[in-house]
Image (tube, helix red, strand yellow):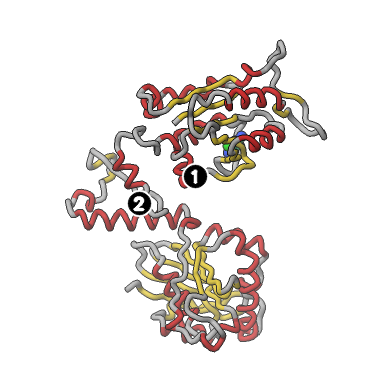
């Protein structure tokens, strides 16, 4: 694979001489060529930037040096097929770089990277380049770097290690590709005991099945804790158990997924619809779910594991849960008023319970003391009253269920 990098700070790319990438270069597997963009300037000061048309802070990279560098690039194909590279322009306004993108780019014979500095490159350079070669504007993520160089180091490393022959251990690549979108499990090496901390005993058991299942549970727990956005379970609510036919829902119509920030508005709206009957039953509006702003919902979405149930795009149910000591605290269980009494709430509750971490010993919930229908449902699901209290004059019940 050939890789050309254009930058006004070529020294920034020196790490590409190191380690596995450096080895692949000297082995001839990777042909990396780093260029100083100023080699394509014609003035005495080797100028690459100027002030922005329309005003504003900072400087913009002038198009001429880039144009000449791209012309040179197109003439340097040396028999490569196709005779132009795929040009990657790193920038925070780009498409987010992912492992899937790395894998696609690793299959291409020739890549070129155009590192911008300052406020960016004159837009006409991107338009012109796209008229002569494939161009992608790519970002590492939602934060701002001073220039594209560090992003290129990251992208070249992620891409190059997928090129056959760059990594000696093809097995580790194969293993990574089977990780199924979950985070890696924790790893340990010698010594067996370090500063009072032992390696998890299962890893010393020699029981391969037990090790595999421990690692699998670790990966799920980690992903749940650190990247719930990666856990997007889909249609697992089997409608055969529910009597939703009379409201026009059929199997396959209902899906459950981890809530995302954009769900906050619908969750708030559904909560208001759902807790209105509670307000009536308790003759009070002093109910937390009825007194939240959309900002409040946005905040607790970051603090709880929350799931939403949708049918044909409509949000029809939700539940949230989080650890409270050794218990898994479940709350805000809601089902759209027109779909209640059909088992959906019970299914959501079961879903939240099965998502609890391994070491949790039981489940806890709070509800209003006069919520007769809800209390009946929770009792049937195995919950028992653990305590009674009042919240701003409203009777509340704390429910508890030991883990099976
Ligand atoms: Cl690719 N470039 C710059 N300048 N900033 C970034 C980025 C890229 N990705 C995230 N932030």
- According to the image, label 2 marks what residue? 178
Horizontal side, residue 104 vs residue 120: left or right: left
Kind of element beneath mark 1: helix
- If the image is split into quadrants, where does the N terminus sit? top left
Which residue ends up furthest to the top in the rendered image?
Answer: 44
- In the rendered image, the vertical position of residue 121 relative to residue 382, given as above or below: above
Asked whether the viewer can see residue 304, the reply is yes
Residue 276 image position (x, y, % from top left)? 64, 80
Residue 403 image position (x, y, % from top left)? 34, 72
Asked whether the viewer can see residue 332, the reply is no
Q: Residues within 10 Å of mark 2 (few under 14, many from 20)?
A: few
At x 44%, y 71%, the residue is 236
Q: Quadrant of residue 138?
A: top right
- According to the image, label 1 marks what residue? 101
At x 56%, y 31%, the residue is 113
- In the rendered image, the vertical position of residue 49 relative to residue 184, given as above or below: above
Q: 56 or 199: which is nearer to us?
A: 56
Residue 80 image position (x, y, % from top left)? 48, 29
Q: Are marks 2 and 1 in contact (CB under 8 Å)?
A: no
Q: Quadrant of residue 274?
A: bottom right
* Mark number, residue 162: none
Mark 2 or mark 1, whichever is nearer to me: 1
Q: Residues within 10 Å of mark 1 (few under 14, many from 20)?
A: some
Kind of element beneath mark 2: loop
Q: 133 or 97: which is nearer to us?
A: 133
CA–CA distance in space, label 2 to label 1: 16 Å
Which residue ends up furthest to the right in the rendered image?
Answer: 54
Q: Earlier in the sequence, mark 2 or mark 1?
A: 1
């Amino acid at each position: 694979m050939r890789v050309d990098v254009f930058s006004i700070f070529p020294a920034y790319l020196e790490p590409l001489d190191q380690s596995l990438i450096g080895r692949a270069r000297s082995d001839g597997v990777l042909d990396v060529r780093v260029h100083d963009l100023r080699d394509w300037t014609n003035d005495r000061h080797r100028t690459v930037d100027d002030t922005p048309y329309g005003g504003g802070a900072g400087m913009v990279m002038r198009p001429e040096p880039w144009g000449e560098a791209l012309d040179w690039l197109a003439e340097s194909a040396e028999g490569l097929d196709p005779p132009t590279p795929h040009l990657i322009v790193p920038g925070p306004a780009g498409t987010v770089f992912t492992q899937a993108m790395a894998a696609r780019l690793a299959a291409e014979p020739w890549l070129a990277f155009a590192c911008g500095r300052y406020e960016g490159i004159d837009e006409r350079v991107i338009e012109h380049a796209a008229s002569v070669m494939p161009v992608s504007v790519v970002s590492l993520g939602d934060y701002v770097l001073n220039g594209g160089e560090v992003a290129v180091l990251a992208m070249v490393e992620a891409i190059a290690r997928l090129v056959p022959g760059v990594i000696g251990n093809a097995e580790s690549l194969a293993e990574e590709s089977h990780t199924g979108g979950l985070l890696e499990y924790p790893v340990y090496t010698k010594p067996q005991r370090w500063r009072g901390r032992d390696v998890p005993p299962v890893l010393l058991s020699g029981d391969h099945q037990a090790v595999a299942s421990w690692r699998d549970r670790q990966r799920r727990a980690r992903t749940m804790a650190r990247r719930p956005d990666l856990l997007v379970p889909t249609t697992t609510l089997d409608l055969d158990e529910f009597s939703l036919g009379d409201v026009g829902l059929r199997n396959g119509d209902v899906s459950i997924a981890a809530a995302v920030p954009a769900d906050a508005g619908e969750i708030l709206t559904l909560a208001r619809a759902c807790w209105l009957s509670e307000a009536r039953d308790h003759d009070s509006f002093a109910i937390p779910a009825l007194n939240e702003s959309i900002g409040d919902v946005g905040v607790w979405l970051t603090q709880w594991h929350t799931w939403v149930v949708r049918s044909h795009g409509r949000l029809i149910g939700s539940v949230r849960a989080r650890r409270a000591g050794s218990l898994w605290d479940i709350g805000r269980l809601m089902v759209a008023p027109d779909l209640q009494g059909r088992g959906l709430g019970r299914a959501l509750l079961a879903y939240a319970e099965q998502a609890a971490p391994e070491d949790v010993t039981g489940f806890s919930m709070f509800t209003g003391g006069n919520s007769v229908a809800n209390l009946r449902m929770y009792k049937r699901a195995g919950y028992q009253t653990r305590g009674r209290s009042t919240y701003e004059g409203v009777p509340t019940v704390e429910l508890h269920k030991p883990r099976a």
